[in-house]
Amino acid sequence: QVQLQESGPGLVKPLETLSLTCTVSGDSISDYYWSWLRQPPGKGLEWIGYIYYSGSTHYNPSLQSRVTISIDTSKSQFSLKLSSVTAADTALYYCARYKPPAFENWGQGTMVTVSS
Amino acid sequence: EIVLTQSPDFQSVTPKEKVTITCRASQSIGSNLHWYQQKPDQSPKVLIKFASQSFSGVPSRFSGSGSGTDFTLTINSLEPEDAATYYCHQSTSLPHTFGQGTKLEI
């Protein structure tokens, strides 16, 4: 059973870059799409983007100018960078495996707060 | 972007009740509509794929129907552990989008 675990700073200053890593275990990262989603406090789910194991990426247009998702198959990890963050980026960030057509496996989520 | 609108936003229900949650898409999405359950302080879990296909291990009281723009998640004989927020999700076109969620209070 695949398991995903997010890691990274819980506090980021405004206008800085948010960086998170997801470590995959229990299955190979060399298949399917590896995704980032977020959930602001008390709100719904937003898809940020995903990366195929080969390296091709798809991003939400609403965030595309600020988002980079990368993958390191040798470490079974993929990462999220979100630049120029504001308070609106405060959210619970999830990594997930997208096995079409659904996000079948999720990490537990990591809370990121944007504040000075 | 395809907008998904769920109703109701919130519902207070009692055990053994039958519950229906609807999800309406802003344009036709065929059967590319999926349902998730998110319990408090947990990550979402897939319940239904392709509008009506139950995901592995999901209790049979959960079922889905619909196609095109109108979809329904039905929970027959509600159990106390079904207290959660339910989301629909479309995979027809990027960006992936979710409904705003329906919170069931039991």
Image: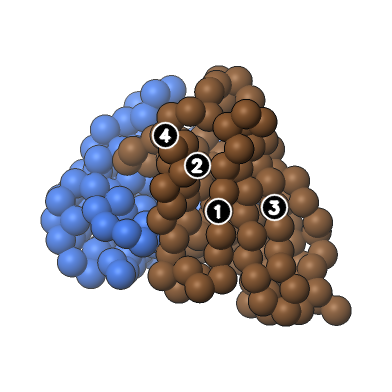
Q: Tell if the residue under mark 2 belongs to the same chain as the one under mark 3.
A: yes
Q: Tell me where residue A63 appears, x and y as whole percent.
A: 50, 70
Tell me the mark number nearer the camera, choosing from 2 and 1: 1
- Write down the residue under mark 1: A69
* Label 3 or label 4, whichever comes before in sequence order: 3
Q: Residues within 10 Å of mark 1 (few under 14, many from 20)?
A: many
Q: Residues within 10 Å of mark 2 (few under 14, many from 20)?
A: many
* Label 4 or label 1, whichever comes before in sequence order: 4
In three-dimensional space, the C-alpha distance between marks 3 and 1, rounded to whole angstroms, equals: 10 Å
Which amino acid does the dot numbered 1 rest on?
Ile
Q: Chain of mark 1?
A: A
- Write down the residue under mark 2: A34
Q: Tell if the residue under mark 2 belongs to the same chain as the one under mark 4.
A: yes
Visible residue check, residue A6: yes
Q: Chain of mark 4?
A: A
Q: Residues within 10 Å of mark 3 (few under 14, many from 20)?
A: many
Using the image as rendered, state which of residue B105 and residue A75 is in the foreground.
Answer: A75
What's the mark number on residue A32? 4
Picture quadrant where residue A14 is located: bottom right
- Write down the residue under mark 3: A20
What letter labels the chain drawn in brown?
Answer: A
- Colour assigned to chain B in the rendering is blue
Is residue B60 shown left or right of residue A8? left
Q: Tell me where residue B105 appears, x and y as whole percent.
A: 54, 54
Is residue B40 shown left or right of residue B94? right
Tell me whether circle 2 and circle 1 mark residues in contact (CB < 8 Å).
yes
Using the image as rendered, state which of residue A48 and residue B11 is in the foreground.
Answer: A48
